[in-house]
Image (cartoon, rainbow, N blue to C red):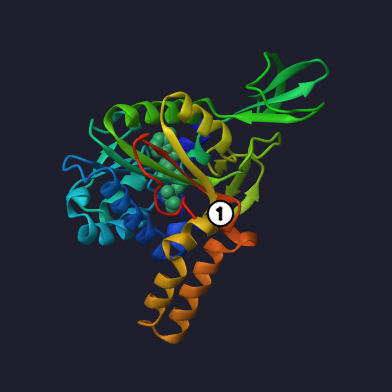
Amino acid sequence: MARANAAYYARPDPLGGFTTAPEISQVFGELLGAWAAMAWQAMGAPADAILAEAGPGRGTLMADARRVLLRAAPGLAATVHLVETSPSLRARQASVVPGAVWHDRLEDVPDAPLVLLANEFLDALPIRQCVRRGAGWVERHVADGAFVEVPCAAPPTMEAGEGDVVEWSDVARAMVRWLAARIVAQGGVALIIDYGPEQSAAGDSLQALRDGQPADPLSDPGTADLTAHVDFQALAGVARGAGAAVQGPVAQGVFLTRLGLFERSRALARTQAGAQAGALMQAAQRLAEPHLMGRLFKAMAVCHPALPPLPGFAA
Ligand code: SAH
């Protein structure tokens, strides 16, 4: 999965067929920029704080967030650190986030209090899948283009019956553990927005999208985007285990509505011609409505334990 996605994201415009939240409405990135400014204030507005994003895609989120930040928290917006492995996406990001600094790995972001944004990043990281078979477990491996089952030890605990698939991501867990420990030591916060259930649950969520259409995950590796649900409950446990505090997860619709999604969209719509105004309000609904992106997507913050409840997480 890691190799297939690395090949996929290295293609010229891997996100061409997608509509992630920042591509749906500029208000998404603007609200996250305002959130970052308030989180930074809550941290005591440290002058050396670093603004970073993991998996910035086309750079749209950071470009929108930064417009807000340059007014609300110019100190924080001075230098932007982007964690991105794809050369083609780096080039795209450079055109909309001038002066950014790139890193291959989260661990390469320089030491300092941190404000990190990560939208639809963790779902792209490789997962493992085990299947309950009788008294034991098998792990799904890929050989000659097909799944094969190899006996394995019991996976991290989760309720599972005969034939159930249990998924987890060692890579995501290691990243969150590292991030939490860093935030405890150096201060800061990481805002994670992604899709997945609130409670850990058995089930096969591996998904392939080719040109925006569902595809077989094993056909033509590197030509489709592979993703899996993010296990927020497990990752919250990992972060707390490393000493960090966790706020949320809350449903994206609730989070964005609390941050003023509809007020901001309406204000912007008033400055636009009819069709564009309508599109802005429709985009807000798409992000917030429970049957669209509002419920499956969640927001969760991994925080230094001294931080107060942050906007969007407190009712
Ligand atoms: N956040 C963007 C794009 C999400 S797609 C949006 O909301 O539109 C996932 C992003 O993560 C892409 O930019 C991809 O190149 C990057 N990515 C995937 N795996 C990565 C890894 N292991 N390390 C760094 N970046 C990675």
**x, y percent for residue 289:** 59, 64
Give the answer, above or below, for where 202 lies relative to 314. above
Q: Can you say which quadrant of the picture contains the N terminus? A: top right
Nearest to the observer: residue 287 or residue 260 = 260
Q: Tell me the kind of residue under disc 1.
A: Asp
Q: Is mark 1 within 8 Å of ligand 1?
A: no
Nearest to the observer: residue 135 or residue 8 = 135
Query: Residue at the spot x=23%, y=30% of the render?
Result: 111
Instruction: Specify whether residue 21 is in view.
Output: yes
Instruction: Specify whether residue 10 is in view.
Output: no
Q: Name the residue under label 1.
A: 211
Q: In the rendered image, which quarter is residue 188 located in? A: top left
Q: In the rendered image, which quarter is residue 202 located in? A: top right
Nearest to the observer: residue 14 or residue 77 = 77
Query: Residue at the spot x=26%, y=61% of the render?
Result: 67
Query: Residue at the spot x=50%, y=27% of the render?
Result: 238
